[in-house]
């Protein structure tokens, strides 16, 4: 999501990157929230990834919450605002739109390749169905509305959809379907000692799924071939959510923001530690290992912070550049060459 206190970053190609953020059109005296949305604008700035020079900009009117934005594989702009998805050309002309839809707020707005996106639509009888669509034509590639899948938390690639029933007491309780096929029971080799519903999942490319829980991360193909099964660099580190990751559209690398707990842990005083960003780690799928790590600033009990502290990451399509935008500014790192 794009918010007032957080900027989204995305590489357009191996030479350019874009930043997007939302500002309100006027300052409201009342708290801003879902009950009192206010007119806002989404701002876009395009930079040369190597020199840092700004080479373009644009803005769109939007709502003040629930806004998302992505650059597609066809070189177009996909904007979600006020339950409407609109596609714009590379020169910002409106191409088409889709009204009265929802997207996966807990997962990715668009697939790792930028070719597909997932929507939920409601029919005239109030029943919801999920639809995987082409990000350029908006063509429906697959659709489902069975009772079981209505409970799923979904993550997806261009050809596979993975569903997890979060509140189930059964371990994992995963289902996988190929586009156009049926749901089939699925499992991935995360130890069963992890609590049900506490394991997160995401696609790092079209056929590879990452599973994470606590300090452990596992990579497996949809056919069940294990590529990586290891602990994170330190036992105290963890990946809080798949939305804090970035993938290269080439599908060879992915990056994660790892957290650690910081603060006092004194239940008798009702004091508990909070998750705080600690570092960004880049993984190579072909090498089956991390290839780069950099520390980032996180929230701290011990330092006076007058504004929100945050970090958002992106990888270039070829996986050679890592971009980190934060409350402190924008940084771009050249990563080790090779796979």
Image (tube, rainbow, N blue to C red):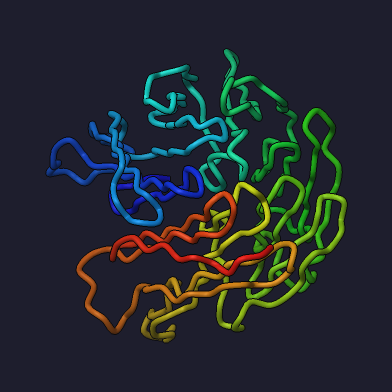
Determine the residue positioned at 39% across, 85% down: 264
The correct choice, above or below, for 91 with respect to 7 in the image is above
Determine the residue positioned at 79% across, 71% down: 191
Residue at the far top: name it: 124
As rendered, which of 319 and 176 lies closer to the eye? 319
Residue 146 location, x and y as percent? 75, 29
Total number of numbered labels?
A: 0
| Residue 77 placement: quadrant | top left
The correct choice, above or below, for 136 with respect to 187 in the image is above
Residue 334 location, x and y as percent? 49, 65
Residue 333 location, x and y as percent? 45, 66
Residue 337 location, x and y as percent? 61, 66
| Residue 241 placement: quadrant | bottom right
Left or right, 283 with reference to 307: right
As rendered, which of 213 and 171 lies closer to the eye? 213
Q: Quadrant of the N terminus?
A: top left
The correct choice, above or below, for 260 with respect to 56 in the image is below
Determine the residue positioned at 43% across, 78% down: 273
**Is residue 166 in view?**
no
Determine the residue positioned at 82% across, 38% down: 183
């Amino acid at each position: 999501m794009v918010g007032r206190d957080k900027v989204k970053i995305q590489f357009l190609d191996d030479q350019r990157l874009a930043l997007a953020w939302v500002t309100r059109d006027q300052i409201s005296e009342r708290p801003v929230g879902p009950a009192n949305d206010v007119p806002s604008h989404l701002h876009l700035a395009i930079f040369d990834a190597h020199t840092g020079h700004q080479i373009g900009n644009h803005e769109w009117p939007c709502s003040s919450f629930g806004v998302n934005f992505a650059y597609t594989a066809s070189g177009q702009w996909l904007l979600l605002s006020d339950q409407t998805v609109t596609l714009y050309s590379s020169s910002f002309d409106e191409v088409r739109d889709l009204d009265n839809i929802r997207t996966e707020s807990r997962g990715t707005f668009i697939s790792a390749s930028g070719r597909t996106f997932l929507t939920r639509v409601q029919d005239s009888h109030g029943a919801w169905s999920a639809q995987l669509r082409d990000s350029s034509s908006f063509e429906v590639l697959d659709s489902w509305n069975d009772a079981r899948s209505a409970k799923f938390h979904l993550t997806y690639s261009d050809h596979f959809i993975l569903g997890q029933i979060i509140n189930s007491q059964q371990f994992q309780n995963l289902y996988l379907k190929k586009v156009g096929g049926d749901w089939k029971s699925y499992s991935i080799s995360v130890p069963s000692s992890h609590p049900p519903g506490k394991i997160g999942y995401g696609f790092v490319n079209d056929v590879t799924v990452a599973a994470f829980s606590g300090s452990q991360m596992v990579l497996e193909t949809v056919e069940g071939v294990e590529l990586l099964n290891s602990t994170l660099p330190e036992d105290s580190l963890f990946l809080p959510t798949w939305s804090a990751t970035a993938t290269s559209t080439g599908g060879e690398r992915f990056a994660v923001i790892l957290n650690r707990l910081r603060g006092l842990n004194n239940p008798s005083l009702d004091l508990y530690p909070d998750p705080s960003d600690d570092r960004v780690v880049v993984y190579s799928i072909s090498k089956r290992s991390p290839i780069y790590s950099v520390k980032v600033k996180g929230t701290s009990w011990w330092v006076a912070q007058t504004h929100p502290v945050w970090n958002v990451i992106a990888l270039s399509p070829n996986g050679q550049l890592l971009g980190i935008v934060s409350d402190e500014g924008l940084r771009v790192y050249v990563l080790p060459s090779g796979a």
